[in-house]
Image (cartoon, rainbow, N blue to C red):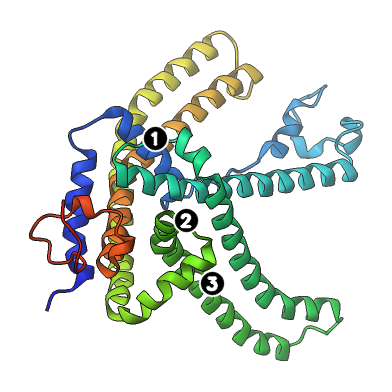
Amino acid sequence: MSWKAIDALDDARGATASLLLPFDAGRWARLALIGLFVGSLGSGGSSFSNTGNTGVTAPGDTGAPPSDLPIDGLPGFATPENLALLAGGIVVAGIVLLLVWSFASAVMQFVFVDGVVSKDVRIRKPFRERLRLGARLFAFQIGILLAVLLVVGIPILAVVLGGVAISGLMFLLAIPLVFLAILLFLVAGLIQQLTTDFVVPTMIAEDKHVLSSWRRVAPLFRAELSEFGLYVLIRFVLGILASIGIGIATALVLLVVAIPFAIVGGALFLALNAAGFGFFAPVSLGVFGVLGVLFVLTAIAVSALVQMPVVTFFRYYSLFLLGSADEELDLVSQFRTDDDSSAPEGATPA
C-alpha cells in the first residue's frame, strides 16, 4: 500500500532541490526573507529595557548608585504618571508592531506559495497582488485567537469582576479551566497549521475566501483522514528534528560569525579606554550598542538562511499532498515525475 503522505516527502525533497540549486544568491536571500515571516523563527520579541538606563544619565552624579537618586533629581520625567505613560506607550507600540508583523506574515504565506510554484521568487509585486487574500487570512487568524481568548477569559473576568473571594476551592475549580485552555490552544494551533498548509493554496487556486476554502478542503480531510492524520504526525516529528538541527547549525555558524565581532569589539574597547572613555560612557555605550545591533541583525540573517531550506521543504510537502488528494488543487503538478505514483488520478505529469 502506498501512502500519499509518505510519497509526498520525496516529491518535496526533489522540488526543494530544484528550486534552491544551482545556487542563486538573490533567490536564496528573498526566500530567507519570506521565511522570516512564514517560518518558525520567533524574531518578534523585542525587549525595551531603556527605562533601566535613565539613572545613569542623571546630572550631578557623584558616584552613588542610581537607586540613591531622589525622584526630584529628574524633574518632569520620572513621575509616576510619566512612567505609566511610558509603559503604556511601549505596550501599545508592541501590540501595533505585532499586528503589523502578523498581517505581513499572512500576506507572505501567499507570496511564498507563488514563489515555490512558479520558481520565480519575488516579494514586492506578489505582496501587492495578494494583499486582499492576506487580509482575509489575517482576519481569520485574529478571529480564531479572539475566540480562544474569550472562552478562556470570560470565566476569569467573571471571577475578577464578580468579586468572588479567592480560596483553595477556586484554585481547584481552575484546574479544568487550565486543561481547557491548553486543549483550545492546541486545537487553534492545528487549525492555523492546516489553514496555512492547505487552505492558503486552495484560496490561490480558486480565489475564494478563507471559510469557502475551508468548506472546499474539509471533505478532503474527511475522505483522506488517515493521509492527513499521518501528514500532521510526520510534520510534527520532522518539525522537532528540524528545529534541533537548525538550532545546532545556527549556533555553530554564529560562533564563527562572532569571532570578527569579538575582535572588533575588543579593539574598540581598548581604543576607547585609551582615549579616556569608560565602558559606561555615552560614547562607549553608543559604539557597542551599534555593534550589538549589527550582531543581532547578522544572527537573524544567519538563522533565516539556515531555516529557509527546511521551511521550503515543508511548503512543498503540503502542496504535493494537497495535489495528490485533489487534482483541481494541484499547484505543483509540473514538478511531479513520470513515475510519481502519488499523483492524483487523471493528472498529467510534467
Which residue shows up at 72% across the image and 29% down it?
56
Of badges 3 and 1, the one in the foreground is: 1
Q: Is residue 41 visible?
A: no
Q: Residues within 10 Å of mark 3 (few under 14, many from 20)?
A: some
Q: Residues within 10 Å of mark 2 (few under 14, many from 20)?
A: few
Q: Which residue is mark 1?
A: 122
Above or below, 227 against 26 in this view is below
The disc labelled 1 sits on which kind of residue?
Arg
Q: Does residue 171 appear left or right of residue 2 in this picture?
A: right
Cα distance in 3D space between marks 3 and 2: 29 Å
Q: Nearer the viewer, residue 27 or 203?
A: 203
Which residue shows up at 32% across the image and 36% down it?
120
Residue situated furthest bottom in the rendering: 169
Q: Which residue is mark 2?
A: 207
Q: Nearer the viewer, residue 229 or 96?
A: 229
Above or below, 71 against 192 in this view is above
Q: Which residue is mark 3?
A: 185
Q: Residue 325 at x, y = what percent? A: 28, 70
Q: Residue 34 at x, y = what percent? A: 42, 41
Q: Residue 65 at x, y = what percent? A: 74, 35
Cα distance in 3D space between marks 2 and 1: 20 Å
The disc labelled 2 sits on which kind of residue?
Asp
Above or below, 186 against 180 in this view is above
Q: Quadrant of residue 261?
A: top left
Of badges 3 and 2, the one in the foreground is: 2
The disc labelled 3 sits on which kind of residue?
Phe
- Mark earlier in primary sequence (2, 1): 1
